[in-house]
Image (cartoon, rainbow, N blue to C red):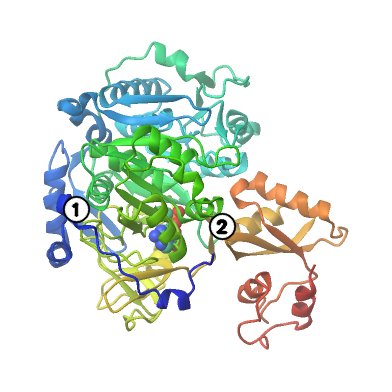
Amino acid sequence: MSQPTIESILQEKRLFNPPAEFSQGARIKSLEDYEAIYQKAAADPEGFWAELAEQELDWFQKWDQVLDWQPPFAKWFVGGKINISHNCLDRHLTTWRRNKAALIWEGEPGDSRTLTYAQLHREVCQMANVIKDLGVTKGDRVAIYMPMIPEAAIAMLACARIGAPHTVVFGGFSSEALKDRLVDAQAKLVITADGGFRKDKVVPLKPAVDAALADNAAPSVENVLVVQRSKENVAMTPGRDHWWHDLQAGASYDCPAEPMDSEDMLFILYTSGTTGKPKGVVHTTGGYNLYTHVTTQWGFDLKDTDVFWCTADVGWITGHSYIVYGPLSNGATSVMYEGVPRPSNPGCFWDVIEKYGVNIFYTAPTAIRAFLKAGEHVPNARDLSSLRLLGTVGEPINPEAWMWYHLVIGGGRCPIIDTWWQTETGGFMITPLPGATPTKPGSATRPFPGILADVVDLEGNPVADNEGGYLVIKHPWPSMMRTVYGDDDRFRRTYWEHIPPQDGKYVYFAGDGARRDEDGYFWVMGRVDDVISVSGHRLGTMEIESALVSHPAVAEAAVVGRKDELKGEEVFAFVTLEGTFSPSDQLKAELKQHVVQEIGAIARPGEIRFADGLPKTRSGKIIRRFLRNLASGEALSGDASTMEDQSVLEKLREGD
Ligand code: WTA
């Protein structure tokens, strides 16, 4: 089992046409249809999006201008008034969908709950009223630190309803990471749970919130709303902490959705970048609602009868866009599952598919590789015949995993959409349309209509077919991030300055390397910056380095990604110690635990290697390229003569 390499991908020639039966029933039925729509959208992106915005969404007031583009700052549907919670809930209540399942939730211990649109609407209104009573008003930020339970989605929709931007913090992040985000977002309220279930254990969430708030470390936080889930004893600070079930009991079902300006901030979601501090990616209301709505509908070829399941956590963008907002805006039935495959239950995903008759299943390559390793007998023992479409997201999928997904899970009859996108893009950008686009294992295929993607060199010139380059987007799209929260300058530097404008036009730099083949298919090769992907989770190497250096024993740290069969990449750390400390296995274990404490278990180094020194250029920059070579036991790529101290490499190679 191998990760995609340029060589293996160049040899990948298999082509899978959408099954005729699938195409016949699909919204977009042929490559010609896709091409016609694509051309039309490319000729007039604003007109294309405006038509869809009019047709697909409810607006309290129509916009005056479709796009106001002052590079790199975009405004979509300027002057329009809209509320995404209304579009996800209220507008369905006057239709037959009122009593359709909106969320089907399965808890890890086997408990379950289904909320119809009417029921979800009621709970969202109640929570919105509770939040208002806790002093949150339009514009105030609310942090959501929750397990995968319906209240996580309810909290998001409640915030959106009253115009309070949410920032969801993945429940696997540590109290330190939570604190940083609370401080950066200046959150006024935290919504959390006592604990959640993960891999047969209880993850203590409320104690982590207490730790984040200790010593007045995040003074903007006035209240904490706690959902009861694990039923463990947790400390409640009087005046600050409130049980949701206590306040819900007295809360009204009536809470009209606040008319929001199309460009009002909907949420901040923190994601890793090249520098140490995660950045707050800002998304706004109207454009994000439209883009997630349309991509869900076309990309997943959504039908009203479908049961749709995206296995992501709501703490990531995939959960925001494709568990909550995209599916609910379409009036779909969205499955939410608290668990993850674990040794005690390796077939749990297949059980959920069988139990609810899931039709559309969207997961990550890292999960598929783990299933592949566990063996086909696990899925083969379940009835997966309800499936009609499969999707993947988060990292390049190796053709072997793609084929296994296609044959073993999809029974050879389900198209696979390999969707390339990012926290910053809001929704998927390059993806097959399942009834139209022939697929090639390992390729995200072609851009979504309205998306002008290209592969260019560092000067911005398009590269020839099959030559590697940088993936860029050449025209604004409705759900593009608007800025880095509180840091316009970082937004500009990170995404808009690596590649110079072309004919005066700014291009968005995605940070991924890619290749486009002779059929116009994109093959995403992975990050070109210091971001690594561990089990599809995006981590910044500098973030982990800062965590290591904050330990008293560590003088210097350099982190690289090392290829891993299952996780895609794993964290490999080189560490030099302060004079009085000496290397030991115990210290290694302590440092790994320290990273878990500072960031979360997802960032735990797979390996730490102690070193006397790190390879540096004469100007003092760490040469990561060499460290990547060393981590994976390869020959050094490139010239070591620019190094300040040649002997460092020898010692590192000897390592341990
Ligand atoms: C990677 C996740 C190859 C890519 C939605 C991107 C992919 C980063 C794919 C964003 C794919 C995502 N093929 N690589 N289909 N999808 N990526 O912000 O490197 O967590 O830049 O968003 O994941 O990760 P993020």
- Residue in the foreground of this view, choosing between 284 and 290: 290
Q: Residue at x 86, y 62 (%)?
A: 579
In the rendered structure, the answer to whether residue 134 lies left or right of residue 582 reads: left
Cα separation between marks 1 and 2: 34 Å
* Circle number at residue 631: none
Q: In this orientation, does residue 398 appear?
A: no
Residue kind at label 2, given as amino acid type: Leu
Which residue is painted at 47% across and 53% down in the image?
A: 368
**Residue 481 in picture, x, y percent from top left:** 35, 54
Q: Quadrant where the N terminus lies?
A: bottom right
In this view, 288 is above or below 458: above
Q: Residue furthest top?
A: 250
Query: How many other residues sit within 10 Å of disc 1, few (<14), some (14-19) or many (≥20)?
Result: few
Image location (x, y in percent) of residue 505:
26, 72
Residue 559: x %, y % from top left? 64, 63
Please, what secondary structure does the residue beneath circle 1 have?
A: helix
Q: Residue at x 44, y 63 (%)?
A: 396
Q: Nearer the viewer, residue 650 or 169?
A: 650
Residue 28 found in image quarter: bottom left
Position of 203 compared to 298: left or right? right
The residue at which mark 2 appears reads as 566
Screen quadrant of the C terminus = bottom right
Q: Is residue 444 above or below residue 154?
A: below
Nearest to the observer: residue 562 or residue 387: 387
Q: Is residue 511 left or right of 504 when viewed as pictured?
A: right
Residue kind at label 1, given as amino acid type = Glu
Is residue 440 visible to us here? yes
Question: Ligand 1 is in which quadrant of the figure?
Answer: bottom left
Q: Going 38% across and 11% down the picture, which residue do you hit? A: 250
Q: Which residue is mark 1?
A: 21
Count how many numbered circles sit on residues in the image: 2
